Image (cartoon, grey):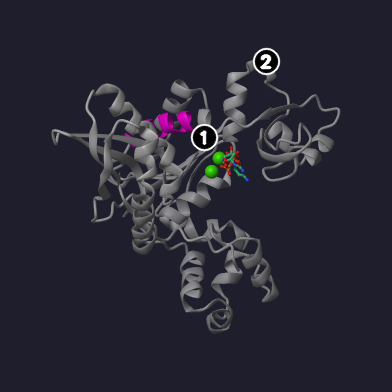
Amino acid sequence: MRIILHLDMDYFFAQIEECEHPEYKGRPLVVCVYTERGKESGVVSTANYDARKYGVNSGISVKEALSKLSGANAVFLPVRHEFYAGISQGIMETVSKYSEKFEYASIDEAYLDITRTSESRYTQAQEIAKNIKNEICEKFHLTCSLGIGPNRLIAKIAGNFKKPGGLTIVRPEQVNEFLEPMDVNKIPGIGKKTSEFLAHFGIRTIKDLKNADLSLLAEYFGKKTTNWLYLSAHGRDESEIGVESEQKQISRITVLKRNTRDVEKIMSEMNELIADVAKELEEKELCFSVVGITLIDQNLKTYTKTKTLAHATNDVYTTEKIMQELFASVIKEKKSEFRRAGIKIEKLKNIKGQKNLGQF
Ligand code: DCP
Ligand code: CA
Ligand code: CA
């Protein structure tokens, strides 16, 4: 019997800003992605719970947020993504120590398979959850919400159940009563369109979905999605946490047109290799969380350097800047001229069971 834990940081970007500016505590705080057009143009990245009371949530326009919060003594701050990513990385490192089966899910979310560490006991799982909360609080002064259940799906729904600061435990024998009264959109992957579609058939709660006519659903959603809907409604999810793919890395290397120490020149010769790696990632449906480079000098000495990302990604193009920094740092340390250069990605994982069904 597996026990899975889901972690999600509370109002993550806004909570970090609160922590950085204790003087704003108690005031509505909104983190914004501004456009160049100024202080009224842009969207809300996230907001603290004081601001949410006024209906300010991720994705609404800054203008709308300003109007909802007029007279509320609110604070508006620009998003600082790199800064939050650094804190995320620290949190993920801390949390990943609680199990060898760890999986990054997003900048503020992760899954742990704690079957072994809890000895399959929910009382012990609860202790582990408390320890995680305490450690995050002590090290980062931040709160999170945790969910524990027999699989990834239940852990995630449990984690979202009580926020902020929640710890919700759903034991196998409680799964049905926990899920049945919920709206279908509580199932991760069922977005607005799917739930509207289901509502046409009179399916609003997870209990409705359990009792639905599968052949009717299959006509609209296809067999694969219908099967997934059926399993989810029954709280079933076999997907493993943090299984690394059998393939350990993808790498490409090339002979440079001329021996060089010029980072820009090296990067300009990486384009083809990067495109090639991107293609392989897509074909094999893999994501990765470590980026690396290789340089070989005129004496055939090899140098490599890697960096662990704050969260796994399947988009190698977003790591070009990191590659460039890694090349630059090797070049700075060594005196050689370089003859060959290459890139690699590691910690490959299969992207599965994480499909977003929002397109329905
Ligand atoms: N985020 C964003 N734009 C969105 C959604 C999220 O920029 N449309 C960013 C800001 C969030 C972070 O991602 O802080 C994590 O997203 P969550 O959905 O987990 O939301 P929060 O952590 O902000 O709030 P909650 O307490 O509901 O988890
Ligand atoms: Ca969150
Ligand atoms: Ca999240």
Q: Quadrant of the N terminus?
A: bottom left
Residue 12 x %, y %: 57, 34
Tag of residue 120: none
Residue type at mark 2 is Glu
Assess whether residue 93 is covered by the magenta stretch. yes
Label 2 packing within 10 angstroms: few (<14), some (14-19), many (20+): few
Q: Which residue is mark 2?
A: 23
Q: Quadrant of the C terminus?
A: bottom right
Residue 351 x %, y %: 39, 57
| Residue 259 in sight in this render | yes
Q: Which residue is mark 1?
A: 144
Residue 63 x %, y %: 80, 39
Question: Which element carries disc 1, helix, strand or loop?
Answer: strand
Task: Please name the predominant secondary structure of the magenta segment in the image.
Answer: helix
Ligand 2 closer than 8 Å to label 1 CB = yes
Q: Judge by depth and name the residue closer to the eye, 110 or 319.
A: 319
Mark 2 or mark 1: whose residue is earlier in sequence:
2
Question: Which element carries disc 2, helix, strand or loop?
Answer: helix
Report the residue at 85% width, 31% height from top: 70
Q: Quadrant of ligand 1?
A: top right
| Residue 130 in sight in this render | no
Report the residue at 55% width, 59% height from top: 187
User: Residue at the front extreme?
Assistant: 258
**Image quadrant assignment for residue 101:** top left
Is 299 rendered above or below residue 235?
above
What is the magenta range?
85-97
Residue 106 x %, y %: 48, 44
Which one is in front in this view, the residue at disc 2 or the one at disc 1?
2
Report the residue at 26% width, 47% height from top: 254
Q: Judge by depth and name the residue closer to the eye, 354 or 119.
A: 354
Residue type at mark 1 is Cys
**Image quadrant assignment for residue 135:** top left
